[in-house]
Image: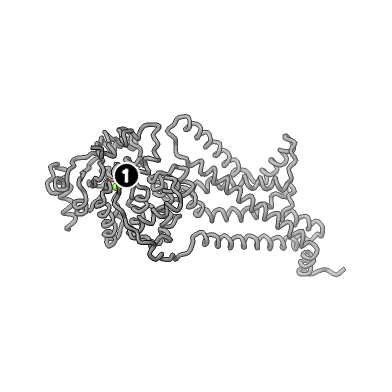
Amino acid sequence: MDSNIITIKNLHKSFGENNILNGINFKVNKGDVSCIIGPSGSGKSTFLRCINLLDYPTQGEIIYKGKNVLEDKYDVDLYRSKVGMVFQQFNLFNNLNVLDNCTVGQVKVLKKKESEAKENALRFLDKVQMSKFIDAKPKQLSGGQKQRVAIARALAMDPEVLLFDEPTSALDPETVGEVLKVMRDLAELQMTMIIVTHEMAFAKEVSNRIVFMDEGMICEEGSPEEILVNPQNERTKNFLFRFIVGESS
Amino acid sequence: MVEKSFFEWISYILQYYGLWFLQGTGITLMIALLGTVVGFLIGLGLGTVKKIPVSRNKFNRIFMSAVNFLITCYVEIFRGTPMMVQAIVLYFGMQEFLGINFNPTIAGIIIVSINTGAYMVEVVRGGIESVDPGQMEAAKAIGMTHGQAMWNIILPQTIRNILPATGNEFIINIKDTSVLNVISVTELFFVTKTIKGAIFRTYETFIVAAVIYFVLTLTVTRLLKLLEKHMDGPQEFVHVSSTMPIVFAKKSGDK
Ligand SMILES: Nc1ncnc2c1ncn2[C@@H]1O[C@H](COP(=O)(O)OP(=O)(O)O)[C@@H](O)[C@H]1O
Ligand SMILES: [Mg+2]
């Protein structure tokens, strides 16, 4: 079955002397919703950033459509346009309004016509219920609204995989729900996603795989039940225990 | 002959030499404006070049560090010497060694442009660095090349950020074009000196010049404030009512 999108083999990343990722193997299949959990500083963000090459891995392979994207002559920009990213800090383009945020990539990178890009963007803005705001600048939006636009912007590129790095961590509690709802809808539509999150209930509900990372390695992975209910690894148990205690206190 | 009062002198000067002042003002404004615009473009270009990320290709790396070195030399030399000296060296140097006879006004525009450019390189570099790094990352993440990200996302924000500094440079240029009198550019200061020489009234003539300079810089300051406001756009936005009923289709077809 040809449902594999990306295969990551023995991925390493170091910043100077510090080894942040220590040999990660990971497969992304079509329709997978994988949630990555783990303590702060364990390398979750770095892992996501290595997947779409915002950080360049120091060693290893990222195989996409049979080719290693880390090879010298590979067209990195095209690959990136197919691997979308949603950031904790939204990173909407501050100089552009909501609509242009969602069309600029289609026009400049995918070389679509303005009209086509606009129609496509409106479809996704409607989906995240932001089509009333197409003329607004990012600074005029709330955090939750910004993040929904950021998701629409990523979707408008028609990505094969969407990466989310703690998409709700910078949000006010009351707006977390509206962003999670959008992501839940995407999961239902079989969008392939890798989500770094601390929202355990959400992770359990939407994902078909949970990955626990610590010290730059994948310690344990499996179905939500396997990891969240019945973890085998000591570190996973510790993390979840501390997490649950922290939540309820 | 009865001695004229201060105000009589002023009105005498304006009456007989008003047109001279006007022409001098025109030349000053033109040199300052062109110099600032060209200098801004030089700064934008070279500042952007300075921020090109280090290439993984060895040849490109060596080439870029050579280019960066040249830019640094340019910036240091033109910031480290007085514009008056630069004007003399360029103007008379060209005559002496290359036999090129520049029109002084054109020489003036070139000097002010190059000089402003040297200051603007650093201003632009700082302006690019003041844009949130997340902007570049988001642009990269949707597949933009470094150039596309710069042009569409980073530089528009940079330009807004450095507008006050550019305006400041413009105002400095209005005042500093006065040093171009050393190469006989007929700008406001040169004209003032000439008029003084004709009527032997230093104080009154220069009072007129001072007022003109002040009105120029004040007007420019005001105009720039308006421009900044305009670039920031309206504080309000309108809600667009229901675009069209669109159904979000399930992602179709596994290829
Ligand atoms: N650009 C960088 N330079 C140096 N160290 C970094 C850089 N980015 C991340 N790190 C380090 O890598 C480690 C993992 O960071 P990160 O991937 O952000 O972890 P997480 O997202 O799991 O909290 C941290 O110790 C952090 O200090
Ligand atoms: Mg992180």
Q: Which amino acid lies under the numbered mark 1 shown in the image of this protein? A: Glu
Residue B202 in view = yes
Residue A143 in view = no
Q: Is residue B252 left or right of residue B220?
A: left
Q: Hey, which residue is sitting farthest right in the picture? A: B1
Q: Which residue is mark 1?
A: A160
Q: Nearer the viewer, residue B108 or A196?
A: A196
Query: How far across and down, in percent of the image, does residue A216 sit?
Result: 25, 39
Query: How far across and down, in percent of the image, does residue B249 sit?
Result: 31, 53
Estimate how packed mark 1 is, as few (under 14), some (14 to 19) or many (20 or more) residues with alpha carbons within 10 Å: some
Q: Nearer the viewer, residue A215 or A219?
A: A219
Label 1: state its secondary structure: loop
Q: Report in which chain the residue with disc 1 lies.
A: A
Q: Hey, which residue is sitting farthest front in the picture? A: B253
Q: Nearer the viewer, residue B11 or A212?
A: A212
Q: Is mark 1 within 8 Å of ligand 2?
A: no
Colouring method of the image: one colour
- Depicted B41 relative to depicted B228: above or below: above
Q: Is residue A200 left or right of residue B103?
A: left
Where, by quadrant of the figure, is residue B255 drawn? top left
User: In the image, what residue occupies the spot 35% across and 37% down?
Assistant: A56
Of the four image quadrants, the one with ligand 1 is: top left
For the C terminus of chain A, give its image quadrant.
Answer: bottom left
For the N terminus of chain A, give its image quadrant.
Answer: top left
Query: How far across and down, in percent of the image, does residue A240 sit?
Result: 16, 49
Query: How far across and down, in percent of the image, does residue B198 sit?
Result: 82, 57
User: In the image, what residue occupies the spot 39% across and 53% down?
Assistant: A120
Where, by quadrant of the figure, is residue B7 drawn? bottom right
User: In the image, what residue occupies the spot 33% across and 56% down?
Assistant: A148
Q: Is residue A69 left or right of residue A3?
A: right
Q: Is residue A146 left or right of residue B199?
A: left
Q: Nearer the viewer, residue B246 or A67?
A: B246
